Amino acid sequence: MLNINTVAEIEFELREEIGQEGRNSQVFRSYDQALDAELVVKRVPKNSVADANALFNEARTLYKSSHPYVVPINYACQDNDFIYLAMPYFPNGSLAQLMSQRFLTVREIIRFVCQFVSGLHNIHSKGLIHFDIKPDNILLSHRDEALLSDFGLAKHTNSLGLARPNQMYVKQLPPECFAANEYTTAFDVYQVGLTLYRMCVGSETFNQQFMNFVVAGNLERPQFEAALRNEVFPNRTAYPEHIPDKIKQTISKCLKPSPDDRFKSVLEITNALSSIDEKLLDWQFELNGNQKKWSKKFDGAIKYIAVENGNSIAKRVPSAGRETNINQYCINNIGTRDLKRFFKI
Amino acid sequence: MRTIGIRVSPSEVTFSIYDTNENAIINIEEIAIPNALSMPEKLKYVRCNILDILREYDVEKAGVRLSEPSARSVNIDRVQIEGVIQEAFASSALNNYYYGAISTIAAKNNIERRRIKPLVRGQEDYEIIENWHELTEKEREAVLTATGAMNA
């Protein structure tokens, strides 16, 4: 057939590979000469699917979802063998990378959730379901804002508000996946809850819980399914002590086994997180072997409490001068209630 | 046509969606403003969400109820949030919008100024919505702002 479109050339230099997204695509840093810009290019081989045109779906979804909290797309193009999606380069990396370095404070958790959930609200209002919300798919802007990314599984809903992803990753499965094959936006609500959970307990704890269901490299599917249905996985009692009850309750509601029992809209999630006790927002949690430690800056000083084998040491460390014990909180067999009182000093 | 009316407070933004064809309020909701965000980020958060809501409901006309210019104590945070909402209107695909205090809202609704207070307090019924007396004052102001937007 005669092609009446104008076909033009785009020229970019593929630099180092910075990650592999899924089995079929590679991600490179690249330099676009016409724009004089450093970009990230995702490259997908055309032979990976029957209809190469469908590979542009992710680009189309991203273009349609233009929003301050959704990763923008600069352009999409193709050559004989590949299609390419060009996006801005985010040197601060992903939320997953940040979470692998340290625990997040409650303030960071709420701020990140409010940001990427705003982006998600936008895509839901355009009749799309994301289907793959997890810390790896949330990128951090140069202002450290959480941007929703990777729309490779996103799908348009039908007139009943249902859609079905082409594939799913078992670690993020909501319980309804074992009973139905079409899903509503409640699927994303579940995954927001799971992401929020991972931000609270850390990826390592979450992954350990998941690995309990993997025996000799295989998922124990019946046990895993039962654990999801019975609200046993993820473990709702594994939170560090500084996580406020409001966040735990919000997560539990997102993770309800029945989609009807979850928040009806993602905006309700951020509404539920909108007023948290200011005193709990800035504790930095650390886990060093058996020792749990929480620290926070107060005018010109740091206060911390460290708990090991049930015994606690609490100190005030001024920026200059001697550190002092906070005797009231140097306790043998310290309880959760004492810790919660300490977080409110 | 759908319109929106918005009433701001420092901790939440209440909005109401009015359908002129059905002469009915189809939604009253709020955007709670997270206290974990800094003020500039709160403003950005409100702005993004308002723009999404305008699109989500296909809103054509809008109004925002502003603080009374004669109020004895003005809440700075509230005024700033009212400011970004006006900016969001100006950046949106709306056909028209208005902004003003109670007297402007009364005029847009063709209601006498003196009737507005009893309406907001729920002492008088507003025929457009059944459970008028069950709403909060902020919700009633948002509804009146939305119905007034029809004449924006």
Image: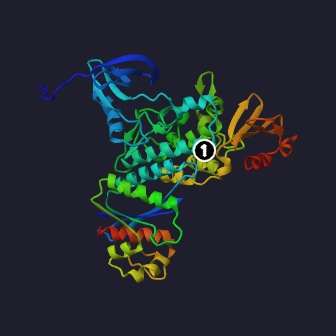
> In this view of the protein, can residue A173 be seen by the observer?
yes
Q: In which quarter of the image is residue A318?
A: top right
Query: Circle 1 — which element?
Result: helix
- Identified by mark 1, the residue type is Arg
Counting from the top left corner in percent of width and height, residue A291 is at 77, 32
Q: Is A28 rendered above or below residue A278?
A: above
Q: Residue B11 versus residue A80: which sits nearer the camera?
A: B11
Q: Residue B44 versus residue A251: which sits nearer the camera?
A: B44
Q: Residue B77 versus residue A20: which sits nearer the camera?
A: B77
Left or right, A48 with respect to A7, comes to: right
> In this view of the protein, can residue A190 be seen by the observer?
no
Counting from the top left corner in percent of width and height, residue B136 is at 51, 71
Q: Split into 4 quadrants, where in the image is the N terminus of chain B?
A: bottom left
Residue at the front extreme, as displayed: A320
Q: Residue A4 versus residue A15: which sits nearer the camera?
A: A15
| Label tally | 1
Counting from the top left corner in percent of width and height, residue B74 is at 51, 66
Left or right, A77 with respect to A180, comes to: left
Q: Split into 4 quadrants, where in the image is the C terminus of chain B?
A: bottom left
Identify the colour scheme used. Answer: rainbow
| Chain name for mark 1 | A
The residue located at (42%, 52%) in the rendering is B47
Assess disc 1: are there few (<14), some (14-19) or many (≥20) residues with their C-alpha within 10 Å of its C-alpha: some
Residue bearing the label numbered 1: A107
Counting from the top left corner in percent of width and height, residue A262 is at 54, 51
Left or right, A38 with respect to A270, comes to: left
The residue located at (35%, 80%) in the rendering is B111
